[in-house]
Amino acid sequence: MIIQILLFLILLILLYFISKKISSAIYTIFLLISKNKHFTNILLALIFLPGTILHEMSHFLVATVLRVPTGNLSVLPEQEKEGEIKAGKLELGKADPFRYSLIGLAPILTGLTVIFILGKNYGLELNFLLNFKITVIQLAVFFVSIIISVTMFSSRKDAESLIISGPIILLISISLYLIGVRVILNQNLAEAITAFFTDINKYLLFILILDWLLLIILQLMVNLLSKILGRKFIER
C-alpha cells in the first residue's frame, strides 16, 4: 500500500508540471498567431472553460459544506487590473487555514474522482492507447481527461493556506507517532485502499502519457510556427 501511495504522489506531481507546460504551450501558439495577449488569454480561458466550471464548483460545494461564507462565483474569463485574464473566481469569507486548505484542494479531489470514474468505465490504461480504432467516445474521453488534468490543480492562491496548515498537520502527525499512536487498518480495508491506489495510478499514468504526447505535438507546433512566422518564443 505504501508503495502505491508514493507512486500516486509521484504521478500527481509529474502531472502537475506537465499540465502547466501544456497550458503554456497552447498560450504560446495562440500568441504567436494573434500577437494579441488579451485575445490569447480569453481564448485559452474559453478552451478550458469546462474544467474551470468543475474547478470553481468544487471550491463552492466544499465551502458550503464547511460553512465558509461565499461571495461572487464566476466561471467566465475576466480581465484583472494587471491586464491578465482570470478564468474563474470564487470569493470566500473568513475562515481558519484548515478549512481554506480543504477548499483549495477540492478541485484536485474532484478531478481525481472524475478520472477514476472515466478509468472504471472506459478503461484508461496503456492498451487503450494501442487501439487504433479511434471513436468519437474515445476522443471525448481524451479531451475530458486532458481538460481535467490541466485545470484540476489548485492555483497559487488556493494553496496559500497550506503554508500554515501543512506544517501544523505534519508536526501533529510526527508528535502522535513519537508518543506511540498508530493507525492499524484491518485487512479488508487495507486491501481496498491498495486496490484503489493501484487503479488510480494506472489511470494517472495513462493521462500522463496522453498529456506528454500532446505536449510533444504542441512544442513541435510552437517550433514550426516560430520559424514560419519569424517570431521568437513568447513565454507566459
Image (cartoon, helix red, strand yellow):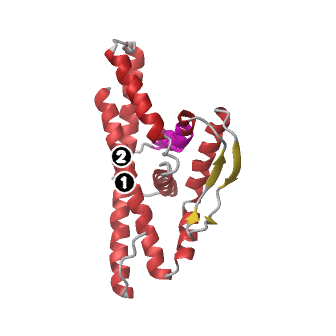
At x 48%, y 75%, the residue is 30
In this rendering, the answer to whether 185 lies above or below 230 is above
Question: Image quarter for residue 38?
Answer: bottom right
* Cα–Cα span, label 1 and label 2: 7 Å
Determine if residue 129 is in view.
no
Instruction: Please state, as top left, top right, bottom left or bottom right, where the C terminus lies in the image.
Output: bottom left
Q: Is 134 a magenta residue?
A: no
Q: Amino acid at mark 2?
A: Ile
Dominant secondary structure (helix, strand or loop) of the stretch shown in magenta: helix
Q: Which mark is residue 30?
A: none
Q: Please give left or right for residue 161 compared with residue 202 in the image.
A: right
Q: Nearer the viewer, residue 48 or 69?
A: 69
Q: Report which residue position mark 1 lands on.
A: 17
Magenta highlight range? 101-122
Q: Report which residue position mark 2 lands on.
A: 13
Q: Circle 2 — which element?
A: helix
